[in-house]
Image (cartoon, rainbow, N blue to C red):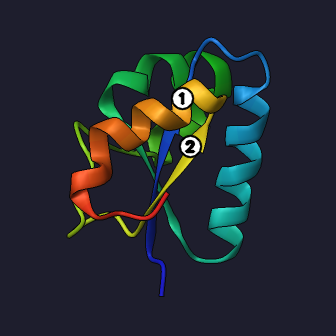
Amino acid sequence: MIHSVMFYLNQNKPSVCEAVRNGIMLCRQKGVEPVFFESDRQFLFEKLGAEFHEQAVYLSKPDSAQIDMIFVFGGDGTMLRALDSYVNQDIPM
């Protein structure tokens, strides 16, 4: 069962905020904890607001003991960067 999902996002994509907002809502509806990179904290606060910011969990990097899956928001290059960075973690994307 999936308990937590790390969001890997490309901040330069215009539609990323709407996709992340929808992803958060779906996760919460299913009882899945959305988790974000610490490096995305300020961006998410500015784009999604204080309510989201206070409820979010932030980590510096994913760990298979804490994260069940990684959702990648961006394009092909974003997916390739995520795979290159975290394929050794054995976390599905």
> What whole-number distance in Å separates the C-alpha atoms at marks 1 and 2?
7 Å
Q: In this view, does 9 lie above or below 89?
A: above
Q: Is residue 10 above or below residue 63?
A: above
Identified at 64% across, 66% down, the residue is: 28
Comparing labels 1 and 2, the label whose residue is closer to the camera: 1
Q: Is residue 13 left or right of residue 54?
A: right
Label 1 secondary element: helix
Residue 65: give x, y in percent of width and height: 20, 70
Identified at 39% across, 70% down, the residue is: 68
Q: Mark 2 points at which residue?
A: 72
Identified at 58% across, 77% down, the residue is: 31
Q: Which amino acid type is shown beneath numbered disc 1? A: Thr
Q: Is residue 72 left or right of residue 60?
A: right
Q: Which amino acid type is shown beneath numbered disc 2? A: Val
Residue 43 shows in this picture: yes
Q: Residue furthest top?
A: 12
Q: Which residue lies furthest to the bottom in this view?
A: 1
Contact? badges 1 and 2 (CB < 8 Å): yes
Question: Which one is nearer the viewer's eye here, 56 or 27?
Answer: 27
Q: Is residue 52 left or right of residue 55?
A: right
Residue 4: give x, y in percent of width and height: 43, 67
Residue 63: give x, y in percent of width and height: 21, 57
Identified at 77% across, 15% down, the residue is: 14
**Label for residue 86?**
none
Label 2 secondary element: strand
Q: Which of marks 1 and 2 is nearer the N terminus?
A: 2
Question: Which one is nearer the viewer's eye here, 6 or 55?
Answer: 6
Residue 9 shows in this picture: no
Are there few (<14), some (14-19), or many (20+) residues within 10 Å of tag 2? Answer: many
The number of numbered discs placed on residues in the rendered structure image is 2
Q: Name the residue under label 1.
A: 78
